[in-house]
C-alpha cells in the first residue's frame, strides 16, 4: 500500500527499530514485573488454598514472608486434640532461608501422616520420608530437574535426598519430617504453628473460641486470613507497580517524542510540500500521530513477545511463576499507545505550525 | 472569459532583523480563466514572493488577492489553506515529490489531502497517460528522470482540477530536451483542459510558449 506513514517508517529502518524497541521496553517492564508479582502472588494463594485445616494455632510474630521462628511448643498438640470440635491437629515448622533463586525460600517440617491426611495431599511418586535426610517436593520443584532420588541443598552444604513428590502443591515446596527440621534448627519440641482441622467447618469460630479459652496467650486464626497475598504482605508492592506503569508510559512517550522530533526535522521540506498542497494543520498532525501510533503498536507487539520470552526464561532459570495477565496487558497496551500518541503531539504541533515557505526552502 | 485571479496593489515587506526589505512594491494583475501567463524578471525582483502570495503561502503586507472570487487576503490561515487545497496546484523547480511514494502514490496523496473521499484511479491514469507516464505509475521518484519527475509533479498539481496552477521555474532543473517536453505538457493542459497557468521562468523559450508575459523588476510589474 502506497502510504506515507508506512513508507516513512520503512525509509529509516534502524531509527524505526530503535523507536519500536523503546516502546517495547516500557511494555516489557510492565508485563514482566506485574507478571512475576502476580505469578508469585497467585502461586502462593494457590498453595495456601490447598491447606484444608481451618485454623492455625501459633504465637504472635511466628509467621512472616521472609522470616519465621519455631516458638510454639509441641506440648500443645495433644492439648488441642482434646478440645471439643477438633478433628485432628498437625504441627509444622516453617523455615525461611536464603536461596539463590529469589533471595529466600521455604521448607516445612511436618508429621507427614497427619499432615497429608488432614490436607488431602498424596504422594504421586516415591515414598514418605524414612530418614532424617529425606525430603518431599511438589511437582513444580520436581519439574526443575529434581526427580525422585536426586539431591537438594537446603542448609549450607548439606545434601538432602528427594524421597518423593507430592500433589497438590501446598505451602512450602520442600517438606521434611518435623523431627529432622527440629534437629537441623536445634529447636526440639518446638514448631512454628499447629494446623487444626475441625469436625464441623461451620463451627470453626466456636472451636477457635474454645481453644482461646483453654489455651490463652496464644494466637488462633482462620488459615484463610493468614495466607494473604504477597501484595497484602508487602504493601509497597502495589505502589511500586503503579510507579512502574507511570515510568513505562514516560519512557514510551519520550522515545516517541525524540523519534518524531528527529523525523520532522529531517522531513521539514516534505511538510512544506504538504502545506503547499493544502494539507491542513489537522491533516499534518494526523499523519504524524498515525506514524507514532503505528510505531507504538509495533512496539507493543514486540514488548509482549519479549515479556513472554523473558518470563519463560526467568521461570526456567529460577522457578518463579510468570503470569501473562489480561488486565495488565490492556494497561501496557494503553500506556504504549497513549505514551506514543502524547509523545508525538508536541512535534506534530510544531510541524503543523511550520512556515510553508521556509519549510520548502529547508535543505 | 472570467477573471480567475485578481491581485490589487500587492506589497510585501520582509523584516530581517531591524531592517525592512520590500519585496513587492505595489503589484496589480488580473488573469483570465484559461490563460497561460509567464512571469519573468531578474533574480530578486519579487517573482517568487508574488507566486507565494498568489498561492496563499504568504500574506501580503498590503493589498488584496481574489482567487476565483474568494478573498485570499482576508482569510484566516485555515481558510487560506482550504482555498489553496481546492483551487491551487503548485509545481516547483525541485519537483518536490515524496521520495517514499510511487508516482501514483504522489497523486493519491494529493487526492487524500483534497479530501471529500476523493479517490479516482481513472482520473489519475488519464493524467499520467496524457503526460506519457502510464508505464511509470509504480516507480518511485528516484527511479525517474528529471523530466519524468517534473511531469509527475505536474500531474499531482492538476489531479484535483485546481482553478490555477502556479509553477515556480518548472524547467529550471531540466535539460533542454526535458524542458521542451515539460513545456509541451503545460501547453497541452492549457489547450485541452483550459487550465489556467502562471509560470515563473528565466527561460525566454519557455516564456514564448505562453500567451502573455509579465515582466517584473524591483518589486514592480514593468
Image (spheres, coloured by chain):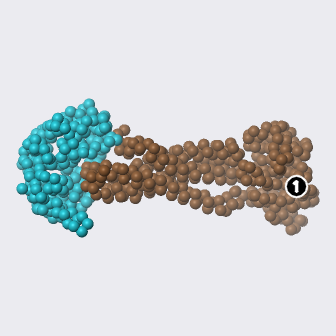
Chain colours: A brown, B cyan
Q: Is residue A248 above or below residue A319?
A: below
Q: Quadrant of the N terminus of chain A?
A: top left
Callout 1: 10 Å neighbours few (<14), some, many (20+)? some
The residue positioned 78% from the left and 52% from the top of the image is A106
How far from the left and from the top, in percent, is residue A346? 40, 58
- Give left or right: position of A206 versus A22: right
Q: Secondary structure at mark 1?
A: helix
- Give left or right: position of B145 versus A34: left
The residue positioned 91% from the left and 52% from the top of the image is A183
- Give left or right: position of A126 versus B158: right
Q: Is residue A187 visible?
A: yes
How far from the left and from the top, in percent, is residue B63? 14, 63
The residue positioned 82% from the left and 38% from the top of the image is A150
Q: Is residue B18 above or below residue B187?
A: below
How far from the left and from the top, in percent, is residue A201? 80, 55
Tally of numbered discs: 1
What residue is shown with label 1? Answer: A185
- Give left or right: position of A274 versus A339: left
How far from the left and from the top, in percent, is residue A220? 82, 62
Query: Which one is in front, A224 or A340?
Result: A340
**Residue at the top extreme of this rendering:** B135
The residue positioned 27% from the left and 45% from the top of the image is B96
Return the chain for callout 1: A
Task: Give the quadrant of residue B64.
Answer: bottom left
Q: Is residue A123 visible?
A: no
Amino acid at each position: 500500500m502506497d502510504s506515507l506513514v508506512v513508507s516513512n517508517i520503512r525509509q529509516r529502518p534502524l531509527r524505526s527499530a530503535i523507536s519500536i524497541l523503546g516502546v517495547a521496553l516500557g511494555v516489557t517492564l510492565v508485563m514482566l514485573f506485574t507478571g512475576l508479582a502476580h505469578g508469585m502472588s497467585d502461586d502462593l494463594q494457590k498453595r495456601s488454598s490447598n491447606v484444608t485445616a481451618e485454623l492455625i494455632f501459633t504465637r504472635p510474630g511466628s509467621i512472616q514472608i521472609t522470616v519465621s521462628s519455631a516458638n510454639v511448643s509441641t506440648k500443645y498438640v495433644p492439648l488441642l486434640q482434646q478440645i471439643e470440635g477438633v478433628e485432628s491437629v498437625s504441627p509444622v515448622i516453617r523455615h525461611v532461608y536464603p536461596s539463590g533463586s529469589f533471595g529466600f525460600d521455604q521448607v516445612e517440617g511436618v508429621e507427614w501422616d497427619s499432615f497429608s491426611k488432614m490436607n488431602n495431599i498424596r504422594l504421586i511418586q516415591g515414598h514418605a520420608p524414612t530418614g532424617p535426610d529425606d525430603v518431599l517436593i511438589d511437582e513444580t520443584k520436581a519439574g526443575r530437574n529434581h526427580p525422585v532420588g536426586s539431591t537438594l541443598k537446603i542448609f549450607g552444604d548439606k545434601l538432602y535426598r528427594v524421597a518423593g513428590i507430592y500433589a497438590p502443591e501446598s505451602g512450602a515446596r520442600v517438606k521434611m519430617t518435623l523431627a529432622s527440621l527440629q534437629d537441623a534448627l536445634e529447636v526440639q519440641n518446638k514448631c512454628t504453628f499447629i494446623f487444626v482441622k475441625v469436625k464441623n467447618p461451620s463451627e470453626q469460630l466456636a472451636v477457635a473460641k474454645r481453644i482461646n479459652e483453654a489455651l490463652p496467650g496464644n494466637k488462633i486464626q482462620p488459615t484463610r486470613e493468614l495466607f494473604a497475598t504477597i501484595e497484602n504482605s508487602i504493601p509497597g508492592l502495589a505502589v511500586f507497580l503503579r510507579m512502574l506503569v507511570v515510568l513505562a508510559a514516560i519512557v514510551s512517550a519520550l522515545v516517541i517524542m525524540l523519534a518524531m522530533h528527529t523525523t520532522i526535522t529531517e522531513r521539514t521540506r516534505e511538510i512544506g510540500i504538504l502545506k503547499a498542497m493544502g494539507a491542513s494543520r489537522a491533516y499534518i498532525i494526523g499523519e504524524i500521530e498515525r506514524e507514532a501510533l503505528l510505531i507504538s503498536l509495533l512496539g507493543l507487539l514486540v514488548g509482549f513477545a519479549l515479556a513472554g520470552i523473558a518470563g519463560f526464561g526467568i521461570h526456567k532459570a529460577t522457578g518463579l511463576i510468570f503470569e501473562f495477565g489480561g488486565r495488565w496487558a490492556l494497561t501496557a497496551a494503553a500506556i504504549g499507545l497513549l505514551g506514543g500518541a502524547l509523545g508525538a503531539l508536541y512535534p506534530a504541533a510544531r510541524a503543523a505550525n511550520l512556515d510553508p515557505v521556509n519549510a520548502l526552502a529547508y535543505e | 472569459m472570467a477573471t480567475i485571479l485578481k491581485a490589487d496593489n500587492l506589497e510585501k515587506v520582509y523584516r530581517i532583523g531591524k531592517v525592512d526589505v520590500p519585496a513587492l512594491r505595489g503589484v496589480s494583475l488580473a488573469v483570465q480563466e484559461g490563460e497561460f501567463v509567464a512571469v519573468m524578471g531578474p533574480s530578486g525582483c519579487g517573482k517568487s514572493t508574488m507566486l507565494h502570495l498568489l498561492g496563499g503561502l504568504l500574506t501580503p503586507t498590503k493589498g488584496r488577492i481574489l482567487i476565483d472570487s474568494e478573498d485570499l487576503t482576508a482569510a484566516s490561515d485555515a481558510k487560506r489553506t482550504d482555498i489553496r487545497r481546492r483551487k491551487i496546484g503548485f509545481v516547483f523547480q525541485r519537483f518536490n515529490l515524496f521520495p517514499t511514494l510511487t508516482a501514483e502514490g504522489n497523486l493519491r496523496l494529493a487526492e487524500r489531502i483534497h479530501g471529500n473521499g476523493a479517490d479516482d484511479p481513472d482520473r489519475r491514469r488519464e493524467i499520467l497517460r496524457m503526460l506519457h507516464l502510464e508505464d511509470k505509475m509504480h516507480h518511485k521518484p528516484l527511479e525517474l528522470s528529471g523530466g519524468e519527475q517534473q511531469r509527475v509533479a505536474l500531474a499531482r498539481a492538476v489531479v484535483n482540477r485546481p482553478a490555477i496552477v502556479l509553477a515556480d521555474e518548472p524547467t529550471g532543473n531540466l535539460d533542454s530536451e526535458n524542458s521542451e517536453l515539460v513545456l509541451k505538457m503545460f501547453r497541452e493542459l492549457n489547450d485541452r483542459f483550459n487550465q489556467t497557468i502562471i509560470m515563473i521562468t528565466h527561460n525566454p523559450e519557455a516564456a514564448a510558449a505562453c500567451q502573455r508575459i509579465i515582466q517584473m523588476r524591483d518589486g514592480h510589474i514593468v
